[in-house]
Amino acid sequence: MHIFVQILLSLSYIHRNNIDHRDLKPLNILLFLNGLIAKLADFGLAKYIKSEQSHITSGVGTQNYIAPEALDGKHAHFKSDIFSLGIILYQMLTFNIIEDITSIDEEIEKIPS
C-alpha cells in the first residue's frame, strides 16, 4: 500500500502546481529500489491549468483508465486523474486488470456491488 500512497502524494503535488497528468496508468508509474519508491512518469499528455481556467476539454489518455466525462469529450479536470487513480487502486487490491473498454456502461455493470 506504500506504493499507492507515494503515487497519491505525487499526484497531489502536481495538482497543487496546476498540472493535470491526463494519462495515469500502471505503465506510467516507475518503481525503484525493489519497489520501495514509486514515481510518476510520462507527462507527454499533461496540461498546465491556468488559475482562471476551471476545466479543460479532454479526450486524451489511455482508454482503460480515462474518466467517463473525458471519454465523452466533456469537461475534464483533476478529477479525471483521481478516477484513473481509483482504477489503479482497484487493480492493485483485486489483481484484476480491466480489459479494453468498449462502453463505460458495460464497465459500470461489471463492478461488483
Image: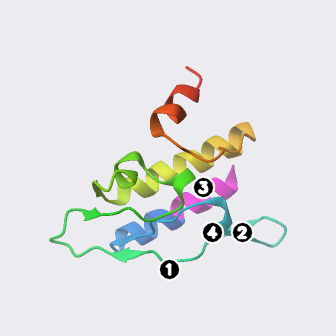
Q: Which residue is more in the foreground, 68 or 29? A: 68
Residue 49 sits in quarter:
bottom left
- Which residue is tagged 3? 5
Seen at 61% across and 46% down, the residue is: 89
Mark 4 falls on what kind of element? Answer: helix
Seen at 46% across and 75% down, the residue is: 45
- Which residue is tagged 4? 28
Instruction: Look at the numbered discs 4 and 3 and tell me whether their residues touch, using CB distance below 8 Å.
Output: no
- By what rule are the colours in the image chosen? rainbow
Residue with the most extreme front position: 102
Tell which circle, 4 or 1, labels the residue nearer the N-terminal end.
Answer: 4
Q: Is residue 37 left or right of residue 40?
A: right
- Which residue is tagged 2? 37
How far is disc 1 from disc 3 in space, using C-alphas? 23 Å
- Which residue is tagged 1? 44
Give the image location of residue 30, x and y in percent: 70, 71
Q: What amino acid is found at the position of numbered circle 2 in the picture?
A: Ile
Q: Which residues are magenta?
A: 1-9
